Each structure stands twice: as structure tokens, then as C-alpha cells.
Amino acid sequence: MSSKHKPSTIAVRTGIESDTQHHAVVPPIYLSTNYGFPSFGDVPTYDYTRSGNPNRNLLETALFELESGKGAVVTNCGTSALNLWVSTFLGPDDLIVAPHDCYGGTYRLFNTRSLKGDFKVEFVDQSDDTAFSQALAKKPKLILLETPSNPLVRVVDIAKVCEQAKAIGALVAVDNTFLTPIFQKPLELGADFVIHSTTKFINGHSDVIGGVVITKDEQHADELSWWGNCIGATGTPFDSYMTLRGIRTLGPRMRAHEESSQQILEYLKAQSRVKTIYHPSLPQHPGHDIAKRQQTGFGSMLSFEFDGSMDELKVFVSGLTLFSLAESLGGVESLICHPATMTHRAMGEEALAEAGISHFLLRLSVGLEDAGDLIADLEQAFSLLEVQQ
Ligand SMILES: *Cc1c(COP(=O)(O)O)cnc(C)c1O
């Protein structure tokens, strides 16, 4: 495949008919941890699976071609992808600027490692121009963007940030977990790296934990690959095989997720128990115009403020039968999450308040069940509240 092909073609065809031994159409899985040296002193392409494996390599190729990059390192989870990225490029005196409402685990990782003196971190509201300029004045080496952000789906102007970053020699990574390359291509907007938790939409079936760092610079790819092997961050052959299998349907899945989420948004807009809805497709969303410019789809992650008491919120959430109360997102099954007690609980009250994550915020990951069934399920859970009154 090559980057002249459309994403769905890359997703489906990468590695197909690559088996030279038996001409298997689907690439075989290589579980062996080690590979023979053809002769004394003759180093093979693969020698040991931590440093290289054919299945991981194919997955890396699919991912960097989908993102219009030049190289990638597939890791054992999204968190280890973020950890690999900071381990490769930051020293004790270097600063990273990260979003104040980033993924909870990212916040915990950067905060804890900075307290150990590994590097410095500043969490800022990246949609606040003044706060962001002040952070840039401190000459960060790395900038992480998460757009749309989790769980409030705030949108940051990638091209604008990359331009500002370039002026001070900073490198920018975009956590593209929420949109995938089907809806957003950060490297084409000027970013230096794309990071994914492939656990989410990329694999899409909630049965593999994985991550990736993608780059458009071959030297960065070599450095990431060296560090991935050094700290043991690389993904396993089986997980790589499964994730590539998930990627085959990435395009149609992303479009179906989005279509259903639009129907659910329409339904939620008319509900008395729903206060503010957060989704970039809504014209009143502060990031709507930027999203329209830099994304090719609005994505399917949404959140809303529940209008009622905490007891009523619990009745509503517990009454749902087609939305599982669970963390994670981007799988075929629909999920509901209460960020304050689930994904974002590690942040603590003060950081939650600063990030605007209230105790009445609920996040939906709209799955691939029938949209009418999902709406009927929301309807019956809301109706439980009327009975109570
Ligand atoms: C889940 C997630 C991560 C962390 O990935 P893991 O695979 O759980 O380690 C990072 N960023 C975002 C946006 C996520 O949703």
C-alpha cells in the first residue's frame, strides 16, 4: 500500500498476500520470541521479538500509512506510547506542555514522573490563547494536544499550535485516539507525532490493549524504536495481529459510530434531564468552526450534564441496559461513563474543577448497536426518573 491510497484501502490491504511461504492471503501470525541467525555473524531482520516482529511491523506500517507518517512504534498500551514519547525526547531540564483536561492516565503519568524529577510539566487550557502563550514563553521542548479532548471534547486548532511551536523549536504530538485518521490527520496539519491508544477505535472491539507513536521523521522513528526496545514498551505479536484485524473495518466502523451518535444527539437535545451537551458538531460548541476546518468527521464521543440529583443520576445510569457502565471507549458496544468517579478520579477534586469536569457529567461512547434500540434504551432510563418524582 502507499499513502496515495484512501484510508479504507490501506486499512484493508496492508499485509494482504505478503506471505511468501504458503501464499496465505491473510498474513500469518509469528509467535516465536526468537529467530535463527542464517550463519555466524549474519544478523537477520528479526532476532528477538522485543526489538522486532513481523506482525508488529505490519501493524506499524498500516498505522503510519493511515496517518501519512514515515515510521511508528507499536506499544503495549496507549499509556506506554505516551511514556515512550516523553522518555525518548525529554531530560530533567526539559518542559512538556499538556492539556489540563487530558486523559486521566496521561495526567497521572506526566505529573508523577515530573515529581520524580524526570522532566517538567505544565498543564494548561489550550483553548485559552493567553494561558497557552504564557506556557510557550517558557520554551517547552514538547507539546501534547488532545483534540477533541476527553471527556469535554474541547477542540484545539492543530495548525495554529504547530506554527507557534515551530517558531520556538518545540515538537508537537496529537493524541488522535478519539477521531483516528479516518476523521483527522494531524501530521498533515503540521504535527510531528501522532499518538493513539489503539485500545479504543483503532482496534475497536474492546479486546486488545495497545498503543502507537507515529512520526513523519525517519530519525525520530529510529530514536523511538531504539527507546521502545530499551525500555521494553513494544507490543506483542498476538495483540498486533488482533489490532490489524480490527483495523480492517476502521473506515466503515467510524462512519457508523458517527451516524448513530448524530441520531442520539438529536434525541438528547429534546430531553429535559439533559443540560449542556458537548459535541463538536453542535454549532454552539466553541470548537465547532475549528472542527469543521481540521476534521473530516465530528466523531462519536459525546458528553452531557445531567439535570437532577446525584441519586437520580444513579437511577438513570443503572436503568440503562444497552449502555454498559464501563471505562474505555471506541468499541462496538455502547458505554456510559461517569468521569468524576471513573476515568478521571485520579485527578482529585481541584484538578477536576479546573478542567470543568463536574460530578454530573456523563460521557457516552456510542457503539454499533441499532441506533433506534439505543434511543429507546435512553428513553426508558429517563422515564424511571418521572416515576420517582
Ligand atoms: C485510553 C486513552 C489513553 C491511554 O491508553 P491505554 O491504552 O489505556 O493505556 C490515552 N489517551 C486517550 C485519549 C485515551 O482515551
Image: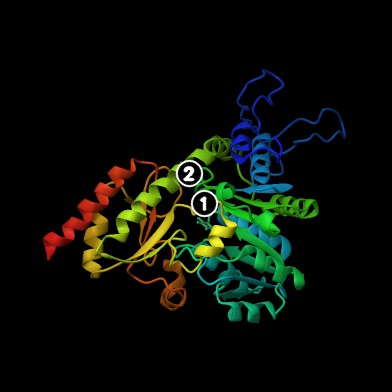
Task: Give the residue type that dot 1 points to.
Answer: Gly
N-terminal-most mark, 1 or 2: 2
Is 317 on the left-hand or right-hand side of 204?
A: left
- Given residues 302 and 87, the one toward you in this image is 302
Where does the image place residue 296, in percent across and percent down from the top left?
56, 51
Task: Give the residue type that dot 2 points to.
Answer: Arg
Quadrant of residue 79 in the image?
bottom right
Residue at 61% across, 45% down: 235
| Color scheme of the displayed model | rainbow
* Dot 2 crowding, Cα within 10 Å, few <14, some 14–19, many 20+: some
Can residue 320 be spotted in the picture? no
Q: In this picture, is 200 found above or below 52?
A: below
Where does the image place residue 58, in percent across and percent down from the top left?
66, 37
Q: Which mark is residue 255?
A: 2
- Given residues 156 and 345, the one toward you in this image is 156
Quadrant of residue 46 in the image?
top right
Where does the image place residue 128, in percent across and percent down from the top left?
56, 77
Residue at 43% across, 67% down: 284
Question: Are the residues flagged by discs 1 and 2 in contact, CB closer than 8 Å?
Answer: yes
Mark 1 — residue? 297
Can residue 152 be spotted in the picture? yes
